[in-house]
Amino acid sequence: MDYRNKFYSKYISSHTACLYSKPTLKEIKKQFPIWQKYFGKFLPENKDAKIIELGCGSGGFIYWFKQIGYQVAEGVDISIEQVEIAKKLGIKNIYQADIKNFLNNSITNNSITKYDVVIMRDILEHFTKDEILDILELVYKSLKNNGIIIIQVPNAENPFSGRLRYGDFTHEIGFTANSVRQALLIFSFENIAVYGTPPVIHGIKSFIRFILWKIIEFCLRFYVIIETGSGKMIFTQNIIVIAKK
């Protein structure tokens, strides 16, 4: 058995449950303000937009979409364990499948309805370089003209990048803003923009974290300017990348 199949068959019990509590709708709802800040501004105005999340886990993001009015949203994940959790939570339109096979079969069978938005949060780092290029090509073919791709990946420029890069046995690679932009340009994605994921203010504790983060960020940028003459770097542990077909 491929090592991935071994881990993904028990991904919650062997990994995510060790880091977080098991998913509940109450815990998912706590993420809504953060997701709105990070991703809300990139979503289409049309609430009938067709959206898919590849590597959707237990479906929290799809649940959020439904709550804010995007009813034509679906998710795909290879982990049976995570898809079963989504079903138990009552989250609809979550399918168990390998994302490459899912997209490739739809394209081959000419049955795909092209997507307005394709989302990949914390998923590309689980693949090899060759597989990443295969996936990006399939995503490009699956998007409507002017459709967008939204990616979140670990940031290899973060001072503690090894924490995320090696914090999951199934991770294969880390990214910088330049390397992920390079991969997207291979397939002619346009209007590529990369953003950090600093603390989001939604209470007094998060406000304090935000202020302290700005101080830390200033110090890190000052250090880089001294060494290189340029402070154009993102220091958060994750980066969000947006691109248009």
Image: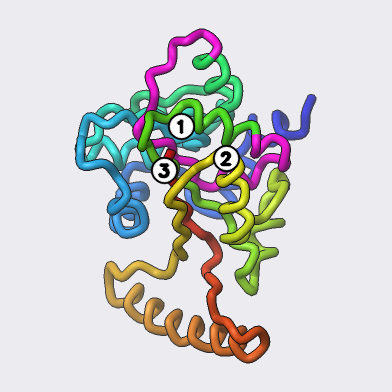
Q: Circle 1 sits in a helix, a strand or a loop, which is it?
A: helix
Say which quarter of the image contains residue 211: bottom left
What residue is at 32 percent from the left and 77 percent from the top? 207
Q: Position of residue 112 (x, y in %)?
A: 43, 16
Looking at the picture, tell me which residue is in the foreground, 13 or 110: 110
Residue 43 included in the magenta stretch of the image:
no
Q: Are marks 3 and 2 in contact (CB under 8 Å)?
A: no
Residue designated by label 3: 244
Tell me which amino acid carries mark 2. Answer: Ile
Q: Position of residue 27 (x, y in %)?
A: 36, 50
Estimate the spatial distance between the alpha carbons at disc 3 and disc 2, rounded to whole Å: 33 Å
Q: Specify the quadrant that holds the C terminus.
A: top left
Query: Seen in the image, is 46 located left or right of residue 24?
Result: left
Q: Are marks 2 and 1 in contact (CB under 8 Å)?
A: yes
Say which quarter of the image contains residue 204: bottom left
Query: Label for residue 12?
Result: 2
Q: Specify the quadrant that holds the N terminus.
A: top right
Disc nearest the viewer among 1 and 3: 3
Q: Circle 2 sits in a helix, a strand or a loop, which is it?
A: helix
Tell me which amino acid carries mark 3. Answer: Lys
Q: Position of residue 58 (x, y in %)?
A: 46, 36
Residue designated by label 1: 85
Say which quarter of the image contains residue 117: top left
What residue is at 35 percent from the left and 67 percent from the top? 200
Q: Position of residue 214 (x, y in %)?
A: 43, 82
93 over 43 or under it: above or below: above
Q: Circle 3 sits in a helix, a strand or a loop, which is it?
A: strand
